[in-house]
Amino acid sequence: MKTIPNIGPWIGDFEKETVNKAMSDWYENPYYYCELFEKEFAKYHDRKYALMTPNCTSAIHLLMLGLGIQEGDEVIGPECTWIASVAPAFYQKAKVVLCDIDETTWCLDPKSVEKNITNKTKAIVSVNLFGNMANWNELLKISKKYNIPLIEDAAQSLGSTYKGIKSGKFGIGSVFSFHRTKTLTTGEGGMLLIDDDKLYKKCKMFRDHGRNDNDPMYFNSEVGYKYMPNNISASLGYAQFQRLDELVSKKHWILQQYSKRLNVIDDITLNYEPEYVYNSAWITTIVLGRSIQIKKQDFIDKLISKNIMARPFFYPLSSIPALNKRGYIEEEHKLKNPMAYDLSSRTINLPSPLNITEEQIDYICNEIKTILMK
Ligand SMILES: Cc1ncc(COP(=O)(O)O)c(C=O)c1O
């Protein structure tokens, strides 16, 4: 079997034609697709405003700038996520407080969040990991009770829903990634969704070197950032967005195919999809139960030796060098956030590229059965 990649997009002729159109229009409205994509993306998620950005990391940074996060503040985030979810808090010299994750959703555990709130907590970043939806009911209650803004990191959950509400509608603002690995891609790209008028204006100003809409030319109000989108990427994003249902359905189909074939194995679980969630399963992920003896890395190595590109779950952030250098102590966090450490040690991302075939999923599942059922 040819190598089966871990992840990848689905770009069709419609996208190529749309990008071609954008390539030949640099005069009439150089932001035509940016504005169109922003408008439709906001409407789809029932949000008032959207700001496209060069990537999701800059969207998170913009939102933190808009919220005024600064030195001395604390920002709560989950132990297990891509570093980008909390990196912008470090840019702002704030302290990142890592909380435990929930065994079933793999997302922020609301109980751990509540334990870690102090009078310095200025934001909570909740990540919908691999398409799974966090416990938004409880997180929204906590946000309201302590009056702390909640940021929804929806980089991995475009297309998921929770109790009928689309991922992207939770909290004061939500962010998306259109990285080449994501369900909807622009190569690199991101989006920030907001409902509040003042916050939107502030984030928009910071996105374009501190310029307000009515500032005279070259008369910037603040020193800002250059997080502007570009029309070529936006045209690709807009075209992909027209096909969103097809892209998300394929991801969901991948999860179902794995689930159908692997449910004969004892003590494993895949992405969580209770009846009130539609899981857009950006990556289908398998948790090996505590009764399974094989080590995570051995399992991954065995799959890779069969040309199946499996990957590890995120390591707890408090265990990686980038954070250890900033004073995060692994042994302390292991005690504080035991579920994150435990889950991370036995969880694996399975290949979930948008071009995967049924035959390839058959092949992968047979190899998994051979490893786990022998
Ligand atoms: C959960 C999460 N947050 C943020 C990001 C950052 O996205 P980007 O690479 O577009 O900056 C990613 C990217 O993989 C992500 O998975």
Image (spheres, helix red, strand yellow):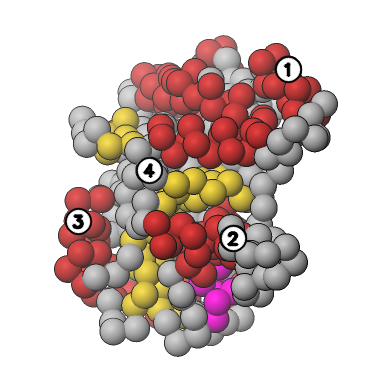
Q: Report the amino acid beneath label 1.
A: Glu
Q: Percent x, y for residue 133? A: 33, 43
Q: Nearer the viewer, residue 49 or 97?
A: 49
Kindly identify which residue carries mark 4. Answer: 47
Q: CA distance from mark 4 to mark 3?
A: 21 Å
Disc 1 versus disc 3: nearer the observer: 1
Magenta span covers which residues?
A: 88-93
The single residue placed furthest to the bottom in the displayed view is: 72
Kindly identify which residue carries mark 1. Answer: 17
Q: Residues within 10 Å of mark 4 (few under 14, many from 20)?
A: many
Position of 150 relative to 242 (above/below)? below
Q: Residues within 10 Å of mark 1 (few under 14, many from 20)?
A: some
Q: Which structural element holds mark 1?
A: helix
Q: CA distance from mark 1 to mark 3?
A: 44 Å
Q: Report the amino acid beneath label 4.
A: Arg
Q: Which structural element holds mark 2?
A: loop
Name the main secondary structure of what is drawn in magenta: helix
Q: Percent x, y for residue 252? A: 42, 24
Does the beta carbon at disc 2 come under 8 Å from ligand 1? no
Kindly identify which residue carries mark 2. Answer: 214
Give residue 44's quadrant in the image.
top left
N-terminal-most mark, 4 or 3:
4
Q: Do the CB atoms of the residues marked 1 and 4 lie less than 8 Å apart?
A: no
Q: CA distance from mark 1 to mark 4?
A: 29 Å
